[in-house]
Image (cartoon, grey):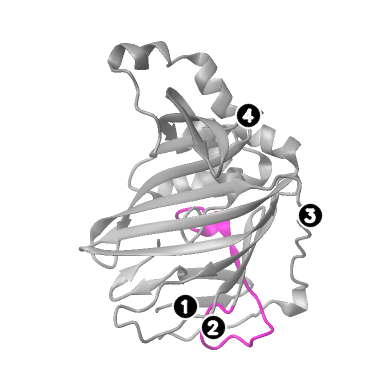
Amino acid sequence: MVAQVVQTEGRTGLLVVAAVTAGLAVCATGCAGGGAAADDARTGSGTVEALHRAATTLERAGSAKARTSMEMATGGTRVTIRGQGVYDFRKQQGELKVLLPQDPAGTAEHRPITELLAPGALFMKNRGAGVPVDKWVRVDTAGLSDGNLVTGGATDPYAAAELLRGARTATLVGETEVAGTRVRHYRGTADLHVAASGASKGQRSALKAAAKGFATAEVPFDAYLDEQGRLRKVRHRFSFVNGHQKGTVAVASTTLLYDFGVPADVRLPRPRDIFAGKIAEQ
């Protein structure tokens, strides 16, 4: 694992944050349709509007439990990072326990990383060598080339919903079930520039950074909404240039939301609990 956080004159720069395994660095079923004619009949402004409202509907829901997974592939190597926690959509704050994959040899055990998500910031505990166990590392998400859509190993659930504001066209694939709940399955492509322009103040800067940093601003997605319009599951497929290996890295990020209305008491670190220093490279 390689990670380095350097703080200079109050500015924290993140070089590599998510898992690194054997040269892989993280910078970073639905129902079948009935053919082209059926897809055309299910594509229209109402479909897109339902996706545009997803983030606002989550705010009304208040909170939820979340499970995340992030799959990365480059150079024939594939790894998956998983997370689980809670999220407060009104405050745009969440807490996730993120589990890094084992090293290829299977010998290295990684402690779960605790991540606190907040507008404009990512806080991490157990992030890397050189950080006291009781300290947090803070990262300014607007300063990340991907806006923290992939850096932390999990996409912020609210940011994942706000990304759907960038959907220009979408297709209602059909109805299916997600974790026992009946949902509608939508498929389309979101534009990061459009999403950033319509995003809330808390997510706008990060999405603008992502629009500039990814290999393409177009993000294919599959989204699943329940009868109340709440986002139950969303899968985004990102693509960015890996400067270390001079190739394109494909990242598929999935967020699953359930148990809406659960308590989500997310407490951000106090300034004195935030580490100001350097994480040693490993």
Q: Residues within 10 Å of mark 2 (few under 14, many from 20)?
A: some
Determine which of the numbered discs, if any, sits on residue 278 in the image.
2
Pick whichever, 129 or 109, lies toward us.
109
Q: Is residue 83 above or below residue 189?
A: below
Residues at marks 3 and 4, CA–CA distance in whole angstroms:
21 Å
Which residues lie in the magenta part? 126-148
Q: Of helix, strand and loop, which one carries label 2?
A: loop
Residue 205 appears anywhere in the view: no
Q: Earlier in the sequence, mark 1 or mark 3?
A: 1
- Left or right? Give the position of 61 relative to 223: right
Q: Residue furthest toward the front?
A: 180
Residues at marks 1 and 2, CA–CA distance in whole angstroms:
7 Å
Determine which of the numbered discs, if any, sits on residue 263 in the image.
3
Q: Is 143 one of the magenta-colored residues? A: yes
Coordinates of residue 129 in the picture (x, y in percent):
51, 87
Residue 38 appears anywhere in the view: yes
Q: Residues within 10 Å of mark 3 (few under 14, many from 20)?
A: some
Look at the numbered discs 2 and 4 and tell me whether their residues touch, using CB distance below 8 Å. Answer: no
Q: Is residue 12 above or below residue 28?
A: below
> How would you classify the magenta stretch by its main secondary structure?
loop
Q: Residue at x 57, y 70 (%)?
A: 12
Residues at marks 1 and 3, CA–CA distance in whole angstroms:
34 Å
Determine which of the numbered discs, if any, sits on residue 229 in the image.
4
Q: Residue at x 63, y 88 (%)?
A: 132
Residues at marks 2 and 4, CA–CA distance in whole angstroms:
44 Å
Q: Residues within 10 Å of mark 1 (few under 14, many from 20)?
A: some
- Left or right? Give the position of 90 relative to 128: right
* Type of amino acid at the residue the image marks with label 2: Lys
**Residue linked to disc 1:** 4
* Type of amino acid at the residue the image marks with label 3: Pro
